């Protein structure tokens, strides 16, 4: 939620570094299910409540290669953030020797990482738009406040539904256009105006719910996580988690 809403004020996230999952191909006609990573299994009772079959979710949770009887081979492609030691592969346990670690050249991630080329921000805006729409639908005329809905009704199933809708909203043109820096010859067109129209809708929905939200607020929220934490920041985040801090990920 934008930082000026009262809900966000109750749930400040110091040192929070959002997860950035990237999946797609240059043609733009393939969208792999997002991989959901968390510290614990989602609560089973929520899935039973909505009669959701976990294996049919719009996200992948775990054991992809093993479930498909595929060989364990993986490349861990990392940027040159100070928190990533160059000898990391030497610290891998024996059971993880199938992982090949490669580092990108310094200061190249924003230029050549396809999913950083506005695609992640596009997805975030589409997710935020659907979240605001869901909040409005659930509170409009129901007598329930936004805070009540957020605390007592919004759950992991609702979150996954929003992820699915936002993912479907990312067009083939958007997926293709994000390769313009790495492989310009494959880009058919520069994309479309999905991002700006989503921002306008987010602001409109927010104001309908009585929230103080502007286009600048949306842009600021979407850009959270675009700057990597320093080693000191990562250590501080790890210390917070060890102390039992509760971090909310959107």
Image (cartoon, helix red, strand yellow):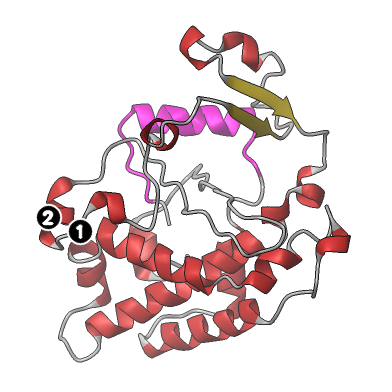
Left or right: residue 156 compared with residue 8: left
Query: Residue shown at 51%/85% (left/top)?
Result: 201
Residue 52 tag number: 1
Q: Position of residue 25 (x, y in %)?
A: 66, 55
Circle 1 packing at 10 Å, graded few (<14), some (14-19), many (20+), is few
Q: Which image quadrant: the C terminus? A: bottom left
Look at the numbered discs 2 and 1 and tell me whether their residues touch, using CB distance below 8 Å: yes
Query: Residue shown at 62%/38% (left/top)?
Result: 229
* Front-lying residue, 242 or 189: 189
Write down the residue under mark 2.
48
Q: Position of residue 48 (x, y in %)?
A: 12, 55
Where are the magenta residues, as a range?
228-248
> Which residue occupies the extreme right position in the image?
185
Query: Residue shown at 87%/61% (left/top)?
Result: 184
* Front-lying residue, 165 or 202: 165
Q: Position of residue 108 (x, y in %)?
A: 82, 42
Left or right: residue 116 compared with residue 126: right
Residue 129 visible? yes
Number of numbered callouts drawn: 2
Q: Which image quadrant: the N terminus? A: bottom left
* Front-lying residue, 204 or 97: 97
Q: Is residue 241 magenta?
A: yes
The alpha-carbon separation of the residues under discs 2 and 1 comes to 6 Å
* Front-lying residue, 112 or 239: 112
Q: Quadrant of residue 102?
A: top right
Q: Is residue 221 above or below residue 74?
A: below
Q: Position of residue 166 (x, y in %)?
A: 47, 69
Residue 4 visible? no
Q: Secondary structure at mark 2?
A: helix
């Amino acid at each position: 939620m934008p930082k000026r809403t009262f809900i966000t004020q109750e749930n400040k996230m110091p040192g929070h570094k959002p997860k950035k999952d990237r999946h797609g191909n240059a043609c733009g006609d393939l969208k792999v299910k997002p991989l959901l990573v968390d510290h614990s299994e989602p609560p089973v009772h929520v899935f039973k409540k909505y009669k959701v079959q976990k294996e049919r979710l719009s996200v992948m949770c775990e054991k992809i290669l093993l479930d498909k009887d595929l060989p364990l081979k993986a490349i861990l492609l990392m940027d040159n953030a100070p928190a990533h030691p160059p000898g990391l592969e030497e610290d891998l346990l024996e059971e993880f020797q199938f992982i090949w670690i490669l580092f990108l050249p310094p200061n190249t991630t924003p230029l050549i990482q396809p999913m950083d080329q506005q695609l992640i921000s596009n997805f975030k805006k589409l997710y935020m738009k659907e979240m605001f729409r869901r909040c409005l639908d659930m509170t409009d005329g129901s007598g329930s406040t936004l805070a009540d809905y957020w605390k007592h009704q919004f759950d992991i199933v609702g979150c996954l539904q929003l992820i699915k809708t936002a993912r479907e909203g990312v067009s083939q043109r958007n997926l293709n256009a994000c390769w313009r820096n790495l492989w310009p010859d494959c880009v058919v067109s520069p994309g479309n105006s999905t991002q700006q129209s989503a921002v306008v809708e987010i602001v409109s929905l927010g104001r309908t719910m009585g929230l103080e939200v502007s286009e600048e607020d949306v842009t600021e929220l979407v850009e959270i996580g675009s700057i990597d934490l320093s080693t000191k920041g990562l250590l501080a985040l790890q210390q917070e988690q060890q102390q039992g801090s509760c971090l909310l990920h959107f």
